[in-house]
Image: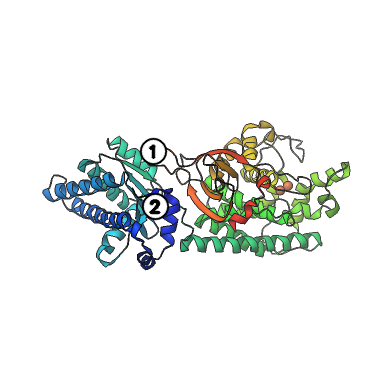
Amino acid sequence: MSGTRATPATGTTRQAGRTPAGGARAQVSTSDLSGDTYIRRAGRQLIVSIYGAMRVIRLYPPENEAVRNALADLAETARALREKEHELELRASNEFIFVNSTRLRLDLDNYASFSQILSVLRACGVGVVRVHGGAQARDWLVFLSLLLSQSKSDDDVTAFDLTERLAAAGVEAFALGAPLVTDDDSDYLQRAKEAAKRTYSQSVAVTKEVMNSVRMGASPNIKKIKRVVQTIVDQILNEETSLVGLTTIRDYDEYTFTHSVNVCIFSVALGRRLGLSKMQLYDLGLAALFHDIGKSRVPLTVLNKVEGLNDDDWRWLAAHPWLGVLALFHMRGQQELPYRAMVVAYEHHMKTDLTGYPKSTRPRLQSIFSKIVAVADGFDAATSRRAYQTVPLSPAAVLAGMRDNPRRGMDPVVVKGFINLLGVFPVGTLVVLDTFELAVVHATNPNPTAISRPIVRIVSDDRGNVLFPGHLVDLTEQKGDGTFARTIIKTENPDRYGINVGDYFV
Ligand SMILES: [Fe+2]
Ligand SMILES: [Fe+2]
């Protein structure tokens, strides 16, 4: 393998992804020629062989001579490539195919084979195929047949499911990975990110308007806020990561408003995981956005107090759940009262054992919406910097507390769903890697078994140089010897490093 490509795969992938196809040709230096020209040529040959094999597998039974020849040819092409390069990894990213981190050039001759293979991999939820040594013709037959049949079926599978099925068929020659979401340059992600930013700032603005008008004694129109909630729900159903990432901004000055929007985003994303329908998510989102509306009736002098809250102040604060119910009664433009929002406003500080507030005189069950909002609210409040909480807790510590401390009074099933949503290391956590790099958790891994190996953004190199905007890597990525390229050692307080986590999400 040439020295220039010994860098971690993703770094090279990003560079390659950014280089326009024509530009790459102009920039090839003499030292690259031997390695890169070889891998490009051999890589294309491999794609053509895979395509050829897929075509005959579809047409003829496995014992047919055309099938046997195509598979023998494919196995040999792959073997030779792997032998020369010591590894063989195919990666599909957007419209490109990479072989061992080198992007193959697409031209008219290979257009059909490229697009066919890309669409089959996409339909199967596969983004990475690692080919081990010793892959025989039979292994390729089983693998390609599985991909072909799966790509035509309607059930959703992951790369992980397919690896299991291959193992069940006795085929161990391939390791499959989910498509990487590490391509920052993709138009789709860029558009989703822009849309998320618009949705977020618009939601904060409308929430501010509504809460301020309640404070002024007016009765605000609920229609506007309903539209905001619908946009949030639609966005989450469409692409969740961007909007959930924005919750890490945690603007100190706008805490009351960003908090409401964050709780809404978390609740909707969590409700979706718990299987709520779109209509239910609209209802839940509205309730979540309004959960603290009662605070608009608490004097600002109490809300902004830094320390020394007296009994009266606490009474005001503890009243915000039922003050919220009153505020909701006064909303305009509402044929029916937002009943669920009232319940959530009233119940969101209750605990599962009813020890929270307001005090319940009779036994009652907290509604599922209230349980969801309580978890989202507890998480956002504990991880934010506020007037009376100058040092926010690390998101991972907060999640662990919710899960392990029964006194927090959270519903264990809802907390579990929340941990599945955010990962063991929630989005926005600053982590130290075993490479001595620092990284900010960007998203959970698409592979559901890799709950402690999220997608992270490297924000500081091994010598402590801060990188901005940094680059994304998948922590399930492995080195040539099968060990992980990077692993989280511990979480860290971003303040210690002067890092503002929210900056990496806008
Ligand atoms: Fe509250
Ligand atoms: Fe709250």
Provide the residue designation for mark 1. 482
Ligand 2 within 8 Å of the CB at mark 2: no
Q: In this view, does 441 lie to the left or right of 386?
A: left
Camera-nearest residue between 360 and 498: 498
Residue at 39%, 52% in the rendered image: 4
Q: Is mark 1 on a helix, strand or loop?
A: loop
Q: Is mark 2 on a helix, strand or loop?
A: helix
Q: Position of residue 140 (x, y in %)?
A: 24, 44
Ligand 2 within 8 Å of the CB at mark 1: no
Image position of 81 with respect to 27: above or below: above
Amino acid at the residue labelled 2 = Thr
Dots 2, 1 in contact, CB < 8 A: no
Q: Position of residue 180 (x, y in %)?
A: 44, 51
Q: Is residue 3 left or right of residue 246?
A: left
Q: Position of residue 285 (x, y in %)?
A: 62, 53
* First in residue order: circle 2 vs circle 1: 2
Q: Is residue 278 visible?
A: no
Q: Position of residue 25 (x, y in %)?
A: 35, 65
Classify 10 Å Cα crowding around label 1: few (below 14), some (14-19), many (20 and above): few
Which disc is residue 256 wearing? none
Which disc is residue 4 wearing? 2
